[in-house]
Amino acid sequence: MIARRGHAAYLLHKLLSSFWFVPGAMVVAGFAAAAGALGLDAAGASEMLKPLGPPFDIREDAAGKLLSTLAGAMVTVVSLVFSLTLVTLTVAAGNLGARLLERYMQNTVTQVTMGLFVGAFVFTVVVLSAVGSAPVEVPRLSVVLALLLAIFSVAWLMYAFHDLARSLQIDQAAAAIAGSLRQRIGAVAAARQAAPADPGELPSDRPCCTIRADACGYVEAIDWEALGAVARSGALVLDVTVAQGDYLTPADPLLTVYGVGEAGEDRARALRAAFTVGELRTDADDLMFLVHLLIEIAARALSPGINDVYTALACVDHLTGSIARALECRLDRITLRDDDGRLRVRTRSADAARMVDTVFPALRRNGMHNVTFALRLIASLERLAPLVADHPVAPALLRNLDEIADHASAGVHEIDRAAIESARTRVREAFERAGLDEI
């Protein structure tokens, strides 16, 4: 298996990025836990705990007041957490960019905090409804569990505030995105190890048809396994012309089909169904979305209104580390073949070369007015030199080196121009030491 199923990954992403899924599951868990605890009390646990003394020998009226207080406190804290979450999203949208909001919605700590207090409220209310009723007037085990759950919820809230404060720091946000990107690169590269790095040559015969999109939107996920199954069933070769994150219109081709005769309407529908198209671009099945997030943070930091060059430098470092990870893992495009090596699907999936061609031109266009940023960008190319000794991306790195140096040298002081040329020389020497002097 060289790629995870696109639709499954997309649905899982939608569930985890929503505010309701984790809290909803914890609410169900709270109701089930309350029912189980009351069942244990009815089975004799309440009478067994009574001789242990406070808080197990609590009276009926005290139990009702305690549970009522806890339930009211849980509702109050839920409204507080919801308000703080909205404040966090507002601040993040203004300082970091609106495209980061979905990552804040995916924050596990925020989701668990909301779910913990709502689940504790449900647990407490269910136990409160059983106080004073048969067969056990005071469900002592359930009351004590509600008290312990409230104490744990308060302790978790302190940790949630700590995580909230950290998440608002732009350096922490950039580091979290870069960490997710490197982790995804490693996972995707490991899943593609069975596929050959060579993208493969298309058949010499003319294509039989072109499958076009039937909707407008962004390609959020592609089910490569479904494409491979259709190609093998019809003895077809598919050249996919779009990648995750591309915007489609009905005039845009999804893929070109090579084979004998027409692909057929049924196969065309099956091929279109392998592409998940949505209104927004997400990182559900798109490595490049995380790359663009870091580029956006760097571009905003370099804008005259913000002028935060050190945040931009941090983004350069994180992007360099991510490209280094892609080179180290040999992140290549997905290619589906038969057991005998016959090409079935050629893709435009994200690889190290695409990352290089995306990152350095975008940063060059946004940051060449700042010499400090330009020098850091050139230095990042020097750091990548030892990793590209036998990689086809080396010429692209040297091409970007010259473009960055030429762009940065235009219209600067002679001293800065000399520093830029010196940095360019060091990068070329690094490539020569890596055995790439003939490029």
Image (tube, rainbow, N blue to C red):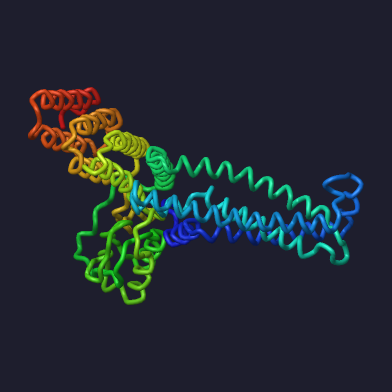
For this view, does 8 lie left or right of residue 298? right
The image quarter containing residue 59 is bottom right
For this view, does 398 lie left or right of residue 19? left
Along the viewing direction, whichever of 190 and 107 lies nearer the viewer: 107
Q: In the image, residue 152 lies at what x, y percent?
A: 67, 45
Residue 204 in sight from this viewpoint: yes
Q: In the image, residue 322 lies at what x, y percent?
A: 35, 38
Q: In the image, residue 52 lies at what x, y percent?
A: 89, 44
Along the viewing direction, whichever of 206 and 2 lies nearer the viewer: 2
Disc tally is 0
Q: Is residue 345 above or below residue 367?
A: below
Q: Quadrant of the C terminus?
A: top left
Residue, x 79% and y 59% (percent of image)? 64
Q: Is residue 191 above or below residue 246?
A: above
The image quarter containing residue 160 is top right
Residue 389 in sight from this viewpoint: no
Q: Residue furthest bottom?
A: 265
Along the viewing direction, whichever of 102 and 303 lies nearer the viewer: 303
Residue, x 65% and y 62% (percent of image)? 28
Q: In the image, residue 381 lies at what x, y percent?
A: 24, 32
Residue, x 64% and y 48% (percent of image)? 153
Residue, x 34% and y 69% (percent of image)? 272
Q: Is residue 94 above or below residue 256?
A: above
